[in-house]
Image (spheres, rainbow, N blue to C red):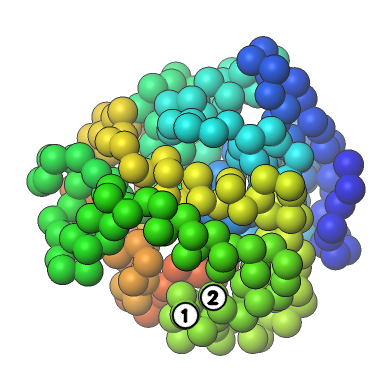
Amino acid sequence: IKKIMLDRNIPIITEQIISLKCGRNLAYSEYGLQEGQPIIFFSGAGFGRHYIPTPFPHTLVAKHAVRFITVDRPGYGQSSPHSGRTYTDWVGDVVELMEDHLSLREARFLAHSAGTPHLAAVCALAPDRVIAASFVCPVSPITGKAPVDRPPENFSRGCGRFCLLHCSGVLDRIFGSVFQKWQDNPTKYVNDSMTQVLCQKDVAFMKEHADFQVQHAADFGDAVCAPNGVEAMLEDMFHINQKPWEFRYSDVKTSNNNNNPIQVWWGGADDTAPHGKWICKQLGVEGECIIDAGHGLIHTEFDRIVDALLMVGS
């Protein structure tokens, strides 16, 4: 497998492309220690199995002693596309990966941004597979009946929902063009994120860790420069949300509902995923809001998040 990576000073246990029972390919990587506590990570849109969301990946071994498992969602990297997929479809992929290829009955799960609905689906539909779950900058449903299935709307969110449901072709053309430019030049993606998405604290962190900026662009390029990368991003960000979710956040469970095994982290300066408090209410947990953090919270607080995840669910 071609790897577009810098020297991260972290052991790679394995990289595999497996054939699922349905005939699609699914690519995954494992980092850290084979005997470590397994954490399965679902990244945000545009990233895949080579994305480790910290400038200090060696801490996964030196501090946390974990087996960190990352996956290319359909269409990214080396995974086959799956047009029209739902979050429920992802649950079957994950369970098959765990049972037939990772030899895992259960694991801890970590998800960021667009990865969080995928984690919610696993927790809701296969809770016996989940020891503990951490939702970072979680996104909320756009379709569904408010207030039960989605947060209250403001004007901009209402407009976004209307466009998603009624102007999907226009969205595909507009954002497909943007994603194509990012595919052609992954560094532009990082620069655009720093100027348009990330808050001041996030940007300062990225500038402080220049090597991580380079790695961030390489990881994005590795996932999105696949032949179906642009379509995968459109699927991940828009198409999959055009229909109501087949579960609710209130359905989220784990194999052990004691010892606070569900955690939520969100940034007070995050305009991309601002509904952490609403999601916590649906989950029945308190969560933790980092007031000055934005959508890059997964980077700035990575060690704290992993520490907290390892402490619960046992």
Can I make out residue 301 in this image?
no
Using the image, determine if residue 308 lies above or below residue 201: above
Using the image, determine if residue 20 lies above or below residue 253: above
Q: Residue at x 63, y 35 (%)?
A: 81
Q: Residue furthest left?
A: 147
Image quadrant where residue 125 sits = top left
Residue type at numbered disc 2? Ser
Can I make out residue 272 in this image?
yes
Observer-nearest of 226 and 206: 226
Q: Quadrant of the N terminus?
A: top right
Observer-nearest of 276 and 186: 186
Measuring from the top left, give residue 246's x and y in whole percent.
31, 28
Q: Which mark is residue 196?
A: 1
Measuring from the top left, give residue 160's x and y in whole percent.
27, 61
Query: Counting other residues with Cα less than 10 Å from the Cα at mark 2, is it few (<14), some (14-19), or many (20 or more)?
Result: some
Q: Which residue is mark 2?
A: 193
Q: Residue at x 29, y 57 (%)?
A: 163
CA separation in Å, label 2 and label 1: 5 Å
Observer-nearest of 240 and 8: 240
Left or right of 306 in this view: 274: left
| SS class, disc 1 | helix
Q: Residue at x 15, y 66 (%)?
A: 154
Contact, mark 2 vs mark 1 (Cβ under 8 Å): yes
Measuring from the top left, give residue 50's x and y in whole percent.
74, 51
Residue type at numbered disc 1? Gln
Q: Which mark is residue 116?
A: none
| SS class, disc 2 | helix
Measuring from the top left, give residue 70's x and y in whole percent.
67, 42
Using the image, determine if residue 311 lies above or below residue 182: above
Image quadrant where residue 276 sits = bottom left
